[in-house]
Amino acid sequence: MGEGQFLFGFSPNTPIPGTTYNGLWVPVQVDLNGVVQVNDIMAGHRVVLETSINDTAPDPDELTLLGGEEIDDLYAGCSLLMTSGDRAGESHLVHQYVGNLHKCIFLKRDRFDEVPSAERVQNGDTCVLISGPKAVPNMHAILNNLWETEQSKPFLKSTHGTITTDGNVQTVWTIENPQGVFKPLAVAIDFTNQTAAETIQIITYYRIVPGGGFIQHDLLPIVGIPASLLVSVNLKDLPNRYGVRVTMQRTAGGAFNYDWTAFWE
């Protein structure tokens, strides 16, 4: 609808819901002459949330939304614009946002008018949150801090494979040149195929200086059928910077397949 066109079915000066185009809010209003006007103050700002009021007792100072992220102050600096109900077309700046309650709090000088309850914002009225000059940097800063916090957390990694014993020392799992300090956790080896005739030695090695050799840290002999068929090699007691290796060697018995999996962060 362009300027100068008539909008039938609406009374003059009645705020009506706008529309979105490529995520931009384009609110419209019928003036005293019944002509559709675009609200230039709000037009072209990015819609960050389309939702409705979820508040059985709406207050001029604060409103609870049905939708929204549970991140404190994510929408602070946005404008909350009503798109239906008696207050359609009215907007106010969100001063504070309580994430777990989906609650928008407004300043006393910029809040919904004190009017009779029947004329206030009502539960179920639709609304949109629209970005503003202060909202965008604020949202970017909050989301960036959340991203950096998540990135700083250790990520659990894993890999797996199968070893067929041949009587030699065989590498089960190794990290030769880590990018930084990391934490080996465990290597689990499946001894389901082992019989009473086999003896396996599991050895853990660490490299503790750049370019140095691997130093034996622990030796675990498995003779015959173990009480627990899934044998766990504990590595979490010693963080590592320059390399770790877990090997196994059959010193008696026949050749069998051993599945394994390793975990680190």
Image (tube, helix red, strand yellow):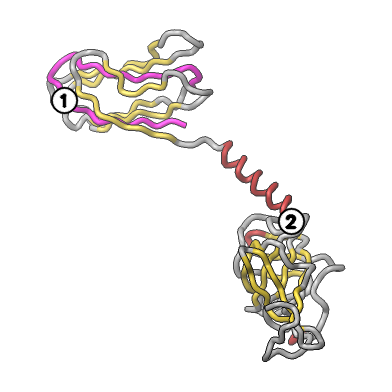
Residue located 62% across and 63% down the image: 23
Residue 185 falls in which quadrant of the image?
Answer: top left
Residue 149 picture location, percent across and down: 61, 41
Residue 98 to residue 121: above or below: above
User: What segment carries the magenta color?
Assistant: 240-265
Residue closest to the eye, 70 or 13: 13
Residue, disc 1: 256
Q: CA distance from mark 2 to mark 1?
A: 63 Å
Residue 44 falls in which quadrant of the image?
Answer: bottom right
Q: Main secondary structure of the magenta part?
A: strand
Residue 11 to residue 65: above or below: below
Residue located 39% across and 32% down the image: 263
Residue 216 falls in which quadrant of the image?
Answer: top left
Residue 245 picture location, percent across and down: 37, 19
Which of the two discs, 2 and 1, sits closer to the camera?
2
Residue 130 picture location, percent across and down: 70, 64
Q: Residues within 10 Å of mark 2 (few under 14, many from 20)?
A: many
Residue 230 to residue 64: above or below: above
Residue 211 picture location, percent across and down: 47, 9
Asked whether residue 56 is drawn in magenta, I would say no
Callout 2–callout 1 Cβ contact below 8 Å: no
Kind of residue sitting beneath label 1: Phe
Residue closest to the eye, 76 or 56: 76
The kind of secondary structure element at disc 1 is loop
Asked whether residue 244 is drawn in magenta, I would say yes
Quadrant assignment for the N terminus: bottom right
Residue 193 to residue 201: above or below: below
Q: Residues within 10 Å of mark 1 (few under 14, many from 20)?
A: some
Residue, disc 2: 135
Total numbered labels placed on residues in the image: 2
Residue closest to the eye, 43 or 15: 43
